[in-house]
Amino acid sequence: LYLASGRTTSASECFLHSLMQNPMALEAVEWLSVLGTTDKSVVLDAVDEGFHQLSMATGRTGSDGAGQTTELAAAIASVKELISALFAKGRHQTSMALQNFMNLEQQFPNNVYLLLNIANLQNQMN
């Protein structure tokens, strides 16, 4: 509703709140990068908070109770790489966005979403 009515600041706040509740809400990240009303560091902080809440709720911490499991750490790194790619793309930093998407494609081979973004960015560069 906020987007439809042109209230981008309110929409951005809702997307940030959703990331704090569910750090895997990648649609929220995509919209935040498109809207350009929020700094990337704020989005990264919201995702960190979301993963922290997720790990506390599920009890998925390291063996000493302080760190994160390897699986969770890998998920966090992948989401942060995607955030960097989307924000670079939104700011027309094509070569940086392309590199980020290609790094992700190595981790997740033949992912249609990643391949589509890579193809679009390569097309923009030509």
Image (cartoon, rainbow, N blue to C red):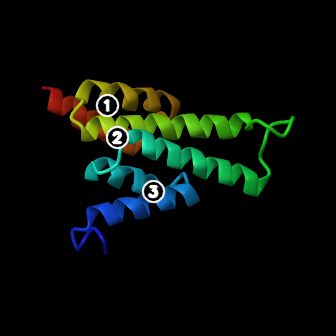
**Residue 59: x %, y % from top left:** 80, 51
| Front residue of 74 and 122 | 74
Where residue 19 appears, as percent x and y from the top left, is 51, 55
Q: Is residue 91 visible?
A: yes
Image quadrant where one finds the N terminus: bottom left
Q: Mark 2 = which residue?
A: 86
Q: Residues within 10 Å of mark 3 (few under 14, many from 20)?
A: many
Q: Residue at horizontal 34%, vertical 49%?
A: 38
Query: Is 64 drawn above or below residue 11 in the view shown?
Result: above
Disc marking residue 97:
1
Q: CA distance from mark 3 to mark 1?
A: 22 Å
Residue 118, compared with residue 61, is above or below; it is: above
Q: CA distance from mark 3 to mark 2?
A: 15 Å
Q: Specify the farthest residue to the right.
A: 64
Mark earlier in primary sequence (3, 1): 3
Residue 108 picture location, percent across and down: 50, 35
Q: Which residue is mark 3?
A: 16
Q: How far separated are the C-alphas under marks 2 and 1?
A: 7 Å
**Mark earlier in primary sequence (2, 1):** 2
N-terminal-most mark, 3 or 2? 3
Q: Residue at x 36, y 43 (%)?
A: 39
Q: In the image, 70: left or right of 125?
A: right
Q: Is residue 114 left or right of residue 6?
A: right
Q: Eyeballing the image, is 116 above or below 27?
A: above
